[in-house]
Image (cartoon, grey):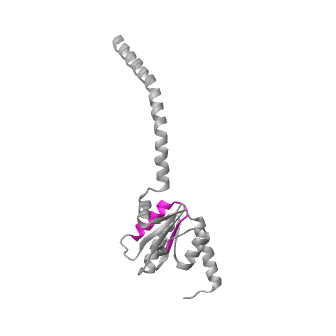
Amino acid sequence: MAISKQRKEEVLSNYSDWVKRSQAIILVEYTGANMKSLDGIRAKIRESGGEFHVVKNTLARRAFEENGMEFPKELLMKSSAISFAFSDPASTAKALTDATKGNEFVKVKGGYMAGKVLTAAQVKALSDMPPLPVMRATLLGVLQAPAGKLVRTIAEPARGLAAVIKARSESAQAAAA
């Protein structure tokens, strides 16, 4: 279905806005998928802080070029949908991977993150990473572990001395009784 030039410009400006705001972009081929399955994918990705849209390849290519992104031509062939990760690329990739499990009609073609083109295998590896809050908690635990160990080491002689004094006072009370 042909769309007017004005509508194309509106769509192109939407694509450009999403590309600018995205931390990562994941391209998906959806040949043979029905709208119900695409709506399910869309809902999962929105929960993770992203967007999922079926796109026109020529307009998507123009939006990418306007934003200085070079995609291989084979990624923008056939039917394409794009997942935009606005907040956490790992959780968006995981949501996309989970939503497309068992759905042979939808497959990941590749993506773009931090100025680099990603292969489908790299997108899969990204989806296997823990979400950002989990990574922050892990890093915080790693940073706090040496400080906690130092505090316990410094406090140990005083704790040992207190235990000796308590045992001595208990033995003195037992002898007096």
Report the quarter where the C terminus lies.
Answer: top left
Left or right: 137 as drawn, with respect to 66:
left
Residue at 47 percent of width and 78 percent of height: 77
Does residue 90 lie above or below 100 as drawn?
A: above
| Residue 53 place in picture, x, y as percent | 52, 74
**Percent x, y of residue 81:** 49, 75
Q: Is residue 95 visible?
A: yes
- The N terminus lies in quadrant: bottom right
Residue name at image x 34 percent, y 12 percent? 175
Image: 119 above or below 151: below
Q: How many numbered circles are shown?
A: 0
Residue 98 is situated, as x and y percent measured from the top left of the image, at 41, 66
Which region is colored magenta? Answer: 81-100
- Horizontal side of 4 relative to 143 (left or right) equals right
**Residue 92 in magenta stretch:** yes
In this rendered view, identify the residue nearer to me: 157 or 100: 100
Closer to us: 80 or 156: 80
In the image, farthest residue toward the bottom:
1
Can residue 44 be seen here? The reply is no
Q: Is residue 88 magenta?
A: yes
Q: Main secondary structure of the magenta part?
A: helix
Q: Position of residue 142 (x, y in %)?
A: 46, 43
* Residue sticking out furthest to the top: 176
Q: Quadrant of residue 123?
A: bottom left
Q: Farthest residue toward the right?
A: 6
